[in-house]
Structure formats: C-alpha cells, structure tokens
C-alpha cells in the first residue's frame, strides 16, 4: 500500500469542520486553480476559433495558393496567363492539390439612379467551389457561372447593397473604362453575400469568367490566374515548394511567366496580426499558471503549519521527511484535481453557451466577425489540464521541504 497516498486520502476525507483554518484555505486554493484553468481553456479556444475563422474567410476568397503571371502577383495590374485545359491538368496533378479554379479581375463602376460605386469584378468559371460563398449568403442565390457565355448576373456584398440600396433581382448598369474607351454592361443582382472582411466586401463583385475575360479583351483560354485549394492547410509552404519547382518561371504559349504565392504571402498584414494572438495566449497561460501556483504554495504552507502536530507524531513513529512530503504533495494533488474539475466545467459550460447562442457580440468592422468564435479542441484541453497539474505539483516541491525543519518533540506540543 502507498502509505503517503493513504494518509493524504484520509486527511482529504476527514471532517472539514474541525479545521477552521484550512477549510477556507483549501477553498481559495481550489478556486484559484479552477479560475486559472478556466481562463486558460477559454483563451485558447477563443483564439483558435478566431484564427481559423478569419483564415477560412481569407482562404475562401483566394484559396491556399494562387498561380498567375509574375507581374500580376507583384503589382495591382492584371496580366493574362494561359489557363487552358492542359495547364489546369498540370495544376490538378500536383501533390496534395484538392481543387483548382480559374479567376479573372476587371475594375468597373456600379451605377444606380442615385449613386455609383467603384468595384472589382471577379470572374469565375463553372468549376468554382461555391461552398464558402454559400455559407455567407444573405439573400438570393448563387448563379451558375460560365466560361462560354454571359448570364449577366452578379453577386454583390451587403456593404455594396446597403450603399447603393440594391435588392435581389434589381438591374443596374456597370461601366468599364480602359484604353478602348468606356463600355457598358447591364447586370441583374442574383444574390447578396456578407463575409465581414471589409477589404473584400467593399470591393469584390462576383460574375461570369466569360464576361470578365471579354471585357479585358483576352483570349478564351486566358485568365488572371488559378486558385488552388490543398488538402492540409498546415502544409501550405511545403506544397508551394512543389509549385516553385515545377511551375514557377515556366512560360505559357503567349510568352508570359508563371509564378505562385500562398495566401499568407498575399495577405501578410492579416496573418501577421493573427500570429500576434499566439503571443497573447502564451502570456495568459503563463499568468494563470503563476496565479494557480502561488495560490497552491500559500495554501500548502498554511496546511503544513496547521498540521505541525500530526507531522511531529508521524516523525516520532519513524516516518521519514520524504514520506511526509509525499503525503502533503498527494493531498495537494487532490486539491488541484478538484480545481481542475471545477475549471473544466466552468470553461466548457461558457464555451458551449457561446458556441450555440452567440451571446458575446463583436464589431465586425474591427474583428471581421460579428460574434466571438470558439473552437473546442479536446486534445488541447486535456494537454492544458495535464500541464497545469504537473506545473502546480512541481512548484510545491520546494515549499514541502519546510517539513524537514519541524522537530518531533516541539511539533507534538504544538497547538
């Protein structure tokens, strides 16, 4: 039988009312561990949810990797690149590629009877993956995009619709200005989307690839580039290495040069901001572990002083300092374990409440989301629990050596 564990269990199960000093100390220590753990779990789950939600939105507009003309990726000008069936086949056969879709951009002006707005028309082909836009639709429906004919239908953001007072089914004129003069097209609003990513919602208007290619005066097998979705976003840089090796610096039939960039390289400001959140999480974790550790150290010292008489009796009966230290460490594990249990209940309860009720709201113009996103990662939560338990027990080893300075004769007479 583990003697220290037996004594610790006996101390933990005895009548708490007989110990007027340790009773509030144990409650404070338990509360300190519980609150610290709850804050750590909530912080990690909120940051994970926030990072992945924003990342998915940015990827939804631009995929993981973009292949285009070198000058297109380096400047704001649009230079056509060959994206015929043969090139699309090459891209689809690259390792770990999940989906490939063409796109083309053209700047234009949306005009109503009372207002106008400069936008960027993004042309999409029939292979366009509508999953992301479908999840962010507000009104209307997504038209069938084509590369062979124009449906004269567009998707606009809620920001554009509010500014121009547009409704689904409304028809409006668009004007395109280039070296050939001014050209006019009449479109019908098929639907309205909202992603809360202001840099996209203020500018991107979706329509047929055929329409944008014709407005740019390009060949039917040309486009601004291709968007590639990969199977594992965490391997984005590795997969891009394959594109750099096999696609970059090659030329198309028109003499243009292929190049590629990841979505992180195309949007460095957003991803740098998301990376800063990791630093905040580490700071919170360090502070909460420190709070829980200090609370447990204070509690252990008070409990040892209160149990001085028992320590003296155990020493008189032949118990070694090591055995008594292990007894109080086991007793501390019971307190920490209870705190971990309460902390998990509190944290998971609040996270589930937010996940299913969206109780806490955010300003989408600042945070890109209108409610606090949460992602409950069970393996990570288990890891936080184990790490908290181990760190708290480790910091208690040093104060437990106070037991070695307690003399049996004086301790037995201690009241």
Image (cartoon, rainbow, N blue to C red):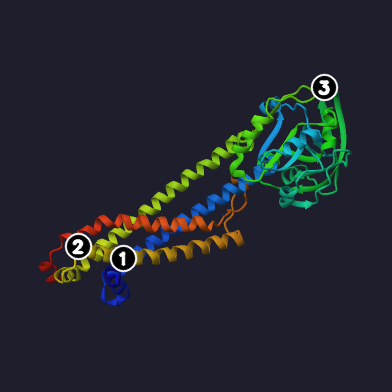
Residue 120 visible in image:
no
Q: Residue sitting at 80 percent across and 24 percent down? A: 253
Q: Residues within 10 Å of mark 2 (few under 14, many from 20)?
A: some
Pinpoint residue 377: horizontal percent, then vertical percent.
54, 56
Q: CA distance from mark 3 to mark 2?
A: 90 Å
Q: Which residue is mark 2?
A: 321
Quarter of the image with the N terminus is bottom left
Q: CA distance from mark 1 to mark 2?
A: 14 Å
Pinpoint residue 158: horizontal percent, then vertical percent.
73, 46
Q: Residues within 10 Å of mark 3 (few under 14, many from 20)?
A: few
Indicate which label's residue lies in the foreground, 1 or 3: 1
Q: Is residue 183 above or below residue 43?
A: above
Q: Which mark identifies residue 330?
A: 1
Which secondary structure lies at badge 2?
A: helix
Q: Residue sitting at 31 percent across and 65 percent down? A: 330
Q: Nearer the viewer, residue 349 or 381?
A: 381
Q: Is residue 74 above or below residue 11?
A: above
Q: Is residue 140 above or below residue 121?
A: below
Q: Residues within 10 Å of mark 1 (few under 14, many from 20)?
A: many
Indicate which label's residue lies in the foreground, 3 or 2: 2
Q: CA distance from mark 1 to mark 3?
A: 81 Å
Residue 247 visible in image:
yes
């Amino acid at each position: 039988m583990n003697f220290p564990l037996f004594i610790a269990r006996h101390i933990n199960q005895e009548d708490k009312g007989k110990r007027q000093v340790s009773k509030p100390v144990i409650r404070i220590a338990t509360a300190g561990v519980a609150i610290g753990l709850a804050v750590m779990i909530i912080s990690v789950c909120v940051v994970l949810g926030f990072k992945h939600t924003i990342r998915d939105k940015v990827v939804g507009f631009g995929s993981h990797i973009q292949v285009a003309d070198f000058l297109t990726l380096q400047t704001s000008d649009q230079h056509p690149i060959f994206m015929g069936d043969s090139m699309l086949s090459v891209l689809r056969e690259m390792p770990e590629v999940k989906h490939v879709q063409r796109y083309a951009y053209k700047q234009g002006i949306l005009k109503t009877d009372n207002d106008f707005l400069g936008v960027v028309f993004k042309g999409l082909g029939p292979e366009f993956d509508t999953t992301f836009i479908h999840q962010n639709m507000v009104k209307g429906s997504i038209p069938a995009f084509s590369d062979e004919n124009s449906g004269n239908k567009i998707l606009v953001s809620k920001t554009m619709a509010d500014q121009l007072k547009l409704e689904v089914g409304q028809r409006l004129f668009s004007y395109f200005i280039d070296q050939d003069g001014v050209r006019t097209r009449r479109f019908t609003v098929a639907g309205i989307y909202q992603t809360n990513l202001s840099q996209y919602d203020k500018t991107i208007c979706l329509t047929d690839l055929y329409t944008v290619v014709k407005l740019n005066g390009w060949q039917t097998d040309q486009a601004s580039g291709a968007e590639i979705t990969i199977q594992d976003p965490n391997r984005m840089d590795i997969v891009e290495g394959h594109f750099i090796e096999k696609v970059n610096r090659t030329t198309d039939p028109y003499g243009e040069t292929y190049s590629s960039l990841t979505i992180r390289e195309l949007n460095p400001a957003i991803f740098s901001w998301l990376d800063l959140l990791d630093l905040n999480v580490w700071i919170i974790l360090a502070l909460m572990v420190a709070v829980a550790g200090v609370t447990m150290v204070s509690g252990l010292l008070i409990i040892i002083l209160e149990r001085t008489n028992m320590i003296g009796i155990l020493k008189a009966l032949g118990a070694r300092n090591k055995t008594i230290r292990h007894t109080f460490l086991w007793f501390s594990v019971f307190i920490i374990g209870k705190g971990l249990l309460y902390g998990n209940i509190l944290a998971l309860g609040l996270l589930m409440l937010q996940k299913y009720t969206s109780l806490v709201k955010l300003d989408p113009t600042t945070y890109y989301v209108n409610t606090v996103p949460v992602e409950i990662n069970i393996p990570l939560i288990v890891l936080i629990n184990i790490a908290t338990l181990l760190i708290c027990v480790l910091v208690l080893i040093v104060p437990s050596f106070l037991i070695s300075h307690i003399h049996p004769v004086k301790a037995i007479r201690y009241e």
